[in-house]
Amino acid sequence: MTLSRAAGAPGRWGGPAFPLAALLAVLVGLLGPPSAAITWSVAWVDQFGSPAPELGTYAVDSFGGDVFTGGLTYGALPGQASEGDADGWIRRTDARGSEVWTVQFGTRRWEEVGAARADASGLYVDGATTGSLPGQTSAGGADAFVARYDLEGNERWMAQFGTDEDDYAAGIVVDRSGVFVFGYTFGAFANRVNHGSADLFLARFDKRGAMEWLRQFGGRGYEEAWAAMIAPQGIYVNGFTDGHLPGARSHGDLDAFLALFSRDGRRLWLRQFGTNRADIGSGLAADASGVYVSGQTWGSFRGFERRGRSDAFIRGFSPAGVGLWTRQFGTRAVDASAGATLVRGDVVTVGTTGGAFHGQTNLGGDDVFARAFEPTTGDAQWTLEFGTDEEETVGWGWGAAGDLFVIGDTSGTFAGESNAGSFDSYLARVDLASIVEHSARGE
């Protein structure tokens, strides 16, 4: 699979009332020549799992030199116990790639961790459950949840919330004053109205876990949330829609969107964009200078021609929402960007490819790629491709202290690691200094 949301789980790619089966069929990568070698610029890989699949790992953040990740498992991770169908998990890995601790949690039903953020006060995660988490009550269908753990993995509080339909939390950001959770719902929250098939929501919690407010908005179609980032300007959120959001227009089958909210929940601006085909906004990075959205397109942005069955893209915006540049890129196979981050002065997008980028080698199946762009001009800086001789998915990328961390799943075995069975999760640390020194710039 190319996009690495939780396969077979409710909501992402398996959610009710949205015809994504045809898109899933398109997301199968092409096979390439097998190799057991791992690219020299990957410093280490932490591969872990159970005999059952680990799928949908797309939460990563860092604090104090360690890396915090999250996802879901259909089995029991080492030293943990399975609670039911699929459980959520969180994990702390040190700077050398060694496990510090892992916590698996859930109900007899299905859970996933959607996003994670860490600071001095702890680790904050959100996600979804079809059960009732300990001490919580199900509102019906799938509910969203948000939780705080201390940096040793101990739960401090958890809040489960939702409508009588399906609700999913997908993005989380934290500042000194509170926790902001972004997601989507098929229902209507209290004193709110559902505008279409699925609406978006933004909720704020204080740092004790009490909800302070919730905003619900959307068009008449289906909207899905993918990521949230906080910057001096406010809270950026992105995703995609099959219709048109208020004040925007549809460009084709599926459009990407980007919106900026104030810290009190006011929408400051929204941009919907795409080709006349399907376009999905997934990656999101932002700072005081700009905001960047990456994703996957089955069409052709202005000035570009699609190279394969689908291409990756990235678009830069000013803090005021003015589009500055767009880059569409790919191989002759299926390519998709799943995440974006700012590191070492570049905006780096990470994803999967079924082919081989210029100067790179496909190691087999879908490989991981990372490509860097200059934030002001959008000029490509370098490209890296790595993987196993089997299939890799990518959930997210995170830049910290000059390093690039990539999280995803693999059906193969990275060098020096072992496969626990089916799809394992992995966290890779990429040595950016080596890439900048040795790789050819551009394509």
Image (cartoon, rainbow, N blue to C red):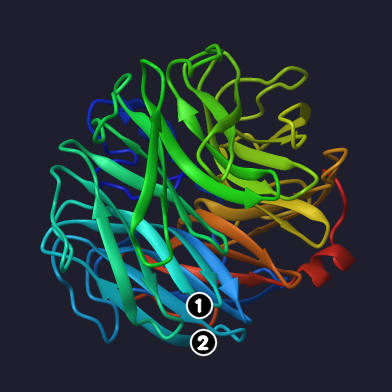
What residue sits 34% from the left and 53% below the top? 211
Q: Which mark is residue 267?
A: none
Mark 2 Cα-neighbour bin, 10 Å: few <14, some 14–19, many ≥20: few
What residue sits 38% from the left and 81% below the top? 153
Q: Is residue 217 above or below residue 422?
A: above
What residue sits 70% from the left and 50% below the top? 232
Q: Is residue 355 above or below residue 360?
A: above
Q: What secondary structure is found at the residue carrying circle 2?
A: loop
**What residue sits right under mark 1 in the picture?**
46
**What residue sits right under mark 2 in the picture?**
98
Q: Earlier in the sequence, mark 1 or mark 2?
A: 1
Occupied quadrant, residue 273? top right
Occupied quadrant, residue 335? top right
Q: Position of residue 333 (x, y in %)?
A: 57, 37
Q: Position of residue 239 (x, y in %)?
A: 50, 35
What residue sits 24% from the left and 82% below the top? 80
Q: Quadrant of the C terminus?
A: top right
Q: Is residue 126 visible?
A: yes
Using residue 435 as the reference point, say whether residue 28 is left or right of it. Answer: left
Q: Are marks 1 and 2 in contact (CB under 8 Å)?
A: yes
Q: Is residue 413 visible?
A: no
Nearer to me, 100 or 321:
321
Q: Position of residue 250 (x, y in %)?
A: 52, 12
Q: Is residue 76 above or below residue 152?
A: above
Q: Is residue 257 above or below residue 212?
A: above
| Residue type beneath disc 2 | Ser
Occupied quadrant, residue 120? bottom right
| Residue type beneath disc 1 | Asp
